[in-house]
Image: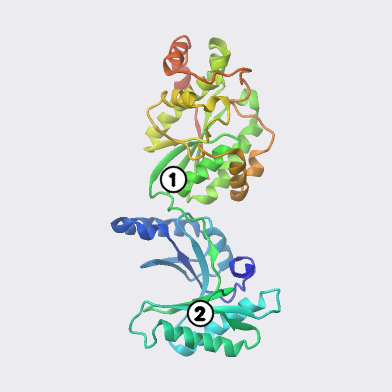
Amino acid sequence: MSSTVSDPDTFNRSLYDSILVRYGELALKGRNRPLFEKQLAANVKRTLRGIDGRPERHWGRLFVKDVTNVHEAIERLTRVFGLVSVSPVVTVSLEMEAIFDAARRVMTEVVEARESSEPLSYKVEARRSDKTFPLDSMELNREVGSTVGEALEGRVRVDLYHPEVVLGLEVRTEAAYLFARRIPGPGGLPVGTVGKVISLLSGGIDSPVASYLAMKRGCHVVFAHFHSAAFVGQKSLLKVMDLARELARWQPYTRLVVFPFAEIQKEIRRGAPEAYRTVLFRRMMQRITDRLRREEDAGAIVTGESLGQVASQTLTNLHTIARAGEAEVLRPLITYDKEEVIALAERIGTYEISVRPHEDCCTVFQPKAPATKSRPRDLETIECGLEWEELVEQCYADREAHDF
């Protein structure tokens, strides 16, 4: 398929009046399918807030009608999880002359947007959900294809097996819809269909990617960040806020909860063996985040941990950290290597923010020789010698929420 057909920046925006939205995995949800479709439609409506566009659900399809800024609408829709592709469409009446005219206009627009002067290979693919329409799908393919071929003689050629462009035609009871562009969406499940999670968001590369993957599987993500202003400064927090703002483009609304963590770190540095500092930091984070999870009625905690990537992410350490709270811990990146994570971070737009040179709260007191095989009972013994309960309470009380 030619690049002009999938590139949302190349089409004639004034030609199209609606957008056809396709979803894939939702069609497999059986009796729960209407719930998923309803959530998807709600997410689309929120995503289009501020611009014209009215979502309408049909069986197996979602149309956005009355669109005045098709380009802006498509740019937003390609960040809605659950959508596999979108197409700008021309809507016409159920009269053959109107369908022929629209087919000629759509294919002319695609041909004129190309850089190549070679004839464009195409075929027509009609779907007739309105069975009262006088022509069936095969007859529509032939009639519309013949009309396009005559109108663009020498500029297009029919190829039924490997066409560069598929001219789509959907005949429904209310109207006919024609399109030739299919712009990929992110896939996955609509945000909110699986439930809510709390994601530990640092300023690094991994946690934003883990958050993105949780959203893609239908989770609504609330972000928790632990900030040590006395040691890392405000630029570190601004970096995390930029990450949250970028990730907010993938879900209808976003909240970042910031916890002041410096006093807890000071107490751990004062009273705990150096080798266990990082694991203890994370156990305290686990307790605080678990409390936020209960308050937000969330089902799990999401982290950016990848097995063996750093010393704190061994099997035993991950177990010891998780035991500090009661929540289910989801680790979307557990088997990813760093290059895979970086590639995904670049694709979703978080990498350039993540590599800004500012430390997070866990790196400022990082031990020279961190423990790799901690056990819960050993850490519990160390914690008995720390005065951490009141500090945890104060940390939670002093939290700040930022909405995007």
From the top left corner, tell me how far across and down residue 81 is, in percent.
47, 54
Type of the residue with mark 1: His
Callout 1–callout 2 Cβ contact below 8 Å: no
Q: Is residue 320 in view?
A: yes
Q: Residue 152, located in which quarter of the rendered image?
A: bottom right
Above or below 66: residue 37:
above
Residue 70 in percent (x, y) is at: 56, 68
Q: The N terminus is located in which quarter?
A: bottom right
Q: Residue 98 carries which label?
A: none
Q: Which of marks 1 and 2 is nearer the N terminus?
A: 2
Of all residues, the one furthest to the left in this rendering is 31
Inter-mark Cα distance, 1 to 2: 39 Å
Q: Mark 1 points at which residue?
A: 220
Q: How crowded is mark 1: few (under 14 residues within 10 Å), some or many (20 or more)?
A: many
Q: Which of marks 1 and 2 is in front?
A: 2
Residue at 55%, 64% in the rendered image: 183
Mark 1, secondary structure of its residue: strand
In the drawing, what numbered circle is on residue 124?
2
Front residue of 208 and 68: 208
Q: Position of residue 338 (x, y in %)?
A: 60, 38
Front residue of 403/39: it is: 39
Where 53 sits versus 193, above or below? below
Residue 383 position within the rendered picture, expressed as x and y whole percent measured from the top left: 46, 13
What number of labels is visible?
2
Q: Nearer the viewer, residue 73 or 399?
A: 73
Residue drawn at point x = 54 percent, y = 51 percent: 249
